[in-house]
Image (cartoon, rainbow, N blue to C red):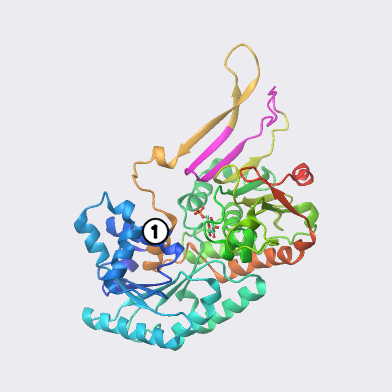
Amino acid sequence: MSSVDAHDTQHTIPTFLIIFGITGDLSRRKLLLALWHLYRNGLLPPQFRIIGFSRREFSNEAFATFVREALADIFTSADAKLVQNFLNLFSYRQGHFDVKERYVALGEYIKSLERAHHSPANKLFYLAISPSHYEIALQNLHDSGITKHEHSAYPARILIEKPFGKDIHTARALDEKLSALFKEEQIYRIDHYLAKEMIQNILHFRFSNFIFESLWNTAGIEKVHIQLMETLGMEGRGKFYSDTGALRDVGQNHLLQMLAMIAMDNPEKSDALHIRAKRAHILSKLRPVENLSRDVVRGQYEGFVLGDDIESDAQTETYFKIRAFLDTPAWKGVPFILESGKRMRQKIAHIVVYFKRSQHALCATTDSRNCQNTLTFTLQPQEEISIQFWAKKPGLSNEVEPRTLRFSYREDTPLSHLPDAYERVLYDCLNGDQTLFAGTDEVLSAWRFITPIIEAWHAEPLHTYGQGTDGPESESFDAYA
Ligand code: BG6
């Protein structure tokens, strides 16, 4: 999907990646590591610089030490010269996100680097900051003139992390702000699930394998179960999470994007315009949930309210399960079960497609799955695709039993390093490819579906569930599914 030509022409001039909130959790856990992998694999553009912008005071040298410490585990086995060259890419400027003068000073610094390179630069601004600072940061970026690009062939790009707003109203306001200040081709809304190898593979798998094509609709599919279960809890994010909740944190974005990849029509062309349009189209077909007590379960793990920075009476959900439907002829009556939780029994992210059972199966089986075929795309803990089918038990009986055809990305590919989603996010943005970033229509359609649930579900019970379990019991829901 990335264009090599675009890559070449853009990279005849320097490229500066400016990371706001570079000392924060996302940067330490994901971005620095992704940058290192891209660097080590020779995938960063020539004349590349990374400028950190955060509230903490650091000299350039102290900041290099910060990066070195953040990646200490990785660097122990790396070539020392390579590490030093990587660290040399970084510099740091201190600033509060709401103080315009600091943006002006940052702009001066960027200009001084451009003078040193004898060239205007491509500039990418990555907002790895709290969403509560987005509006002011965007306004200041614009007003300080840093994002103007009269001297550069390529307009500045803005990378912005989810959540985009808290509901349809705030998302629309943020969107209006973004589109008043920047053009759509400058805006890269990150949903790192879209950049996961297995999620990209869903489209390739679906549209390269004829054997599934005719079954990929209500005639062939009984239901689809999309799960993102985590064993982790808050990990120091209690304040953010208790204000956000699971549905906004991963439901509005990651799970609905997984649904879009499963249900979207063939984009016919493998480019950003076509793929984003088809994702947006299918998300716009989500039917509003009519009956919350039947179609939605929300839960909170025991002990959640004892966590740091969490109010003792917080009603935040750490688990949800939703039965969604799409109003299209192809998907009529097919439930899409969206389920996610923290502190669950196992870490698993996968999509299981349950096919309809054969009307005239010859099989005799005592297995409750009763000759149902499933196709599973697993993202975590290991990327794999598996198909469950039924075969006769070897021997004299006529009984059938389930068997699995399995393809594991890690075991069956020669790649020693599968790129992490954030490598893909950064790489594609550096190359100006918006395919794996959410467009405004997708984001708004997703909020249109989620907002009525969030606004009404406080009237429904908040079930508690034990840590390390599979979530709350929800018999009525399961019976219906
Ligand atoms: C993030 C959420 O977007 O996704 C986290 O904010 C969640 O709460 C994470 O843990 C899951 O991503 P991954 O890539 O670890 O599955």
Kindly indicate the quadrant of the structure image that contains residue 309.
Answer: bottom right
Depth check: 288 or 146 in front? 146
Kindly indicate the quadrant of the structure image that contains residue 478.
Answer: top right
Q: Is residue 471 visible?
A: yes
Give the residue at mark 1: 423
Asked which secondary structure carries label 1, the reply is: helix
Q: Is residue 145 visible?
A: no
Quarter of the image with the N terminus in it: bottom left
Depth check: 237 or 170 in front? 237
Q: Identity of the amino acid at label 1? A: Glu
Image coordinates for residue 77, horizontal then vertical, percent:
26, 49
**354 part of magenta stretch:** no
Q: Which residues are magenta?
A: 361-388
Image coordinates for residue 135, horizontal then vertical, percent:
54, 80
Image coordinates for residue 462, horizontal then vertical, percent:
74, 55
Quarter of the image with the C terminus in it: top right
Total marks placed:
1
The answer to whether residue 212 is above or below residue 177 is above
Residue labelled 1 has its Cβ within 8 Å of some atom of ligand 1: no
The answer to whether residue 49 is above or below residue 201 is below
Crowdedness near tag 1: few (<14), some (14–19) or many (≥20) residues, C-alpha within 10 Å: many
Looking at the image, the residue that sits furthest to the top is 396
Q: Which residue appears at 60% of the width and 19% of the height? A: 393
Depth check: 278 or 28 in front? 28
Q: Which residue appears at 51% of the width and 41% of the height? A: 385
